Amino acid sequence: MEMNQSEKERLKKLDVDLWIIALVTFGVFAIYAVFGNRIMAFCKDSSISVWPRLFAAAALEFGIAGLGISIVCLLRKESFASFGLRKENTAKTIIGTVLCFLPYLIYVFATGQFQGYEPLSIMVSNDLHKAGILQTIIGTIIIGIVWGFFEGFNYRVICEKIDRRYPPKSRFVDWGAIVCAIICILFHPFSISVLGIIELVTTFIAIYGMLMVAKKYDNAWGCVFAFVFIWNAF
């Protein structure tokens, strides 16, 4: 049956949304690919004030995981809350998300990669702590917003946009979650080895499962929890 005009317009808008997210995300990532070594050297240079280094790292991270969805939400006048930032089922979502990350956590511990539990610890965190209590608090809030909230919530919005555009025909095969899991794998270092493949599989299970749990309970706080207390903590 031929689609009516309103449905065509809806799909066209979703196509535009996905292109905006993709172009912004990969555009910023391309900048990182070209200038990444210089940017990282700057951010790790303790002789420079911690604030410009934090803001440089935060701007790059937000550009990759947050700017695209923010532009789209502003363009469409969609609130973040409409993508599952609500109280209902928060506990269930967090528990389900943690269970999805268990294979990944077992991998981290089994391969000796665990070096301490440090939620929201990035390359400038030690210098932030040396700067004083107030600076530590403000800096940690910035880290929490960029590396915690936006990095996790970004996947939820992208997944939802893809599912609206290409509705899954099976309860167990979700294209939005699959694409997001693949993006997560591609945007992080990995190796083609036995352990590398295990890491890829456990990462895929974690991200795919996290998004399926978020979809089941219509709650995105599990995604945020995962990136605050798991992904960026081990």
Image (cartoon, helix red, strand yellow):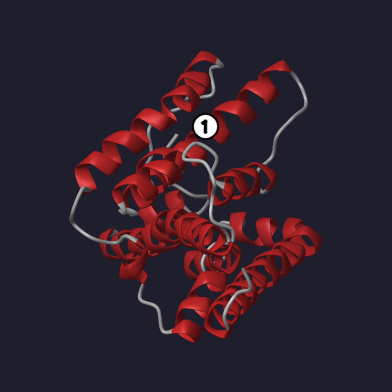
Q: Name the residue under label 1.
A: 205
Q: Is residue 82 depicted above or below 197 in this figure?
A: below
* Residue at left offset 54%, top offset 23%: 113
> Could you say where residue 40 lies in the image, as x and y percent from the top left?
67, 56
Furthest-front residue in view? 1
> Could you say where residue 165 lies in the image, as x and y percent from the top left?
57, 64
Front in this rendered view, residue 10 or 116: 10
Furthest-right residue in view? 34
Front in this rendered view, residue 112 or 194: 194
Which image quadrant is residue 162 in?
Answer: bottom right
Horizontal placement of 19 versus 137: left or right? right
Front in this rendered view, residue 215 or 53: 215
- Viewport quadrant of the C terminus: top left
Front in this rendered view, residue 88 or 64: 88
* Residue at left offset 47%, top offset 62%: 157
Horizontal placement of 212 versus 3: left or right? left
Q: Is mark 1 on a helix, strand or loop?
A: helix
Which image quadrant is residue 42 in?
Answer: bottom right
* Residue at left offset 57%, top offset 72%: 68
User: Which amino acid is tagged 1?
Assistant: Ile
- Viewport quadrant of the N terminus: bottom right
> Could you say where residue 16 lies in the image, as x and y percent from the top left?
64, 77
